[in-house]
Amino acid sequence: MALVLGGRQLGDLVPDLAEHVKALGAWAPVAFILAYVVATVAFVPGSLLTLAAGAIFGIVYGTLYVFVGATLGASAAFLVARHLARATVERHLATSPRFTALDTALGREGRRIVLLLRLSPVFPFNMLNYVLGVTRVTFRDYLVASIGMLPGTVLYVYYGHVVGNVAVLAGGAAPPRDTAYYVLLVVGLIATIAVTAFVTRTARRALAATTAGVLP
């Protein structure tokens, strides 16, 4: 909770950060990507930085820099959770068959599940990175499934480019809700339903297999 609150407070610094980044000239993309990585690990809301990328770099380069920064930041958060918290989770798994089944499901179908999670607007990006880090999802599957971040990234970068002012965006200006917004919303809701059903079904199968193996 402290990390989340601290990240939100750091989010207030995004307009100043954007001004410093723009002043760096040719080094601006590198600085932005590094800032995005740090922000992702520190729970700074990624949406504001993504909007800022559109205002600073335009649609094409903004999308590229956000995707690189978000992927690297998500990977860093995943690895932190994997190496610092996985052992604790494994101790809990020993006493919870249902949790074990869910963890097994994520290990078996990690790429597909993570892809659907990335498409869904329901699951917070920063928190999801850490949560997935303590599951059996392989880092390779996790990394490949990062492609699921692209639709939302493109849309938010586009909105940032349309508004064109980071300070206005930071002040809470609502992005235009056009056709693309509602299309992405529908896709996200479908992904939410799909990932819920898919994880539930896979976990049930894993639980049944575990039970069958335990019972005489």
Image (cartoon, rainbow, N blue to C red):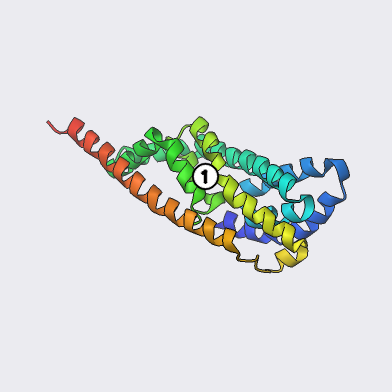
Residue furthest front in the image: 179
Q: Secondary structure at mark 1?
A: helix
Can see residue 56?
yes
In the rendered image, which residue does mark 1 sit on?
130
Q: Is residue 162 left or right of residue 7?
A: right
**Percent x, y for residue 75?**
58, 38
Residue furthest left in the image: 216
The total of numbered circles placed on residues is: 1
Q: Residue at x 43, y 42 (%)?
A: 113
Does residue 53 sit above or below 82 in this rendering?
below
The crowding category of the residue bearing disc 1, from other C-alpha atoms within 10 Å (few below 14, some 14 to 19, many at least 20), is many
Nearest to the observer: residue 183 or residue 142: 183
Q: Is residue 76 left or right of residue 92?
A: right
Q: Residue at x 71, y 62 (%)?
A: 12
**Percent x, y for residue 57?**
78, 49
Which quadrant of the figure has residue 182? bottom right
Q: Residue at x 45, y 57 (%)?
A: 189
Task: Tell me the quadrant of the picture where the C terminus can be found.
Answer: top left
**Percent x, y for residue 197?**
34, 49
Can see residue 35?
no
Does residue 175 sit above or below 3 in this rendering?
below
* Disc 1 residue type (three-letter): Tyr
Nearest to the observer: residue 57 or residue 75: 57
Does residue 216 sit above or below 156 in this rendering?
above
Q: Is residue 149 left or right of residue 57?
A: left
Task: Tell me the quadrant of the picture where the N terminus can be found.
Answer: bottom right
**Percent x, y for residue 58?**
76, 51
Q: Residue at x 51, y 47 (%)?
A: 118
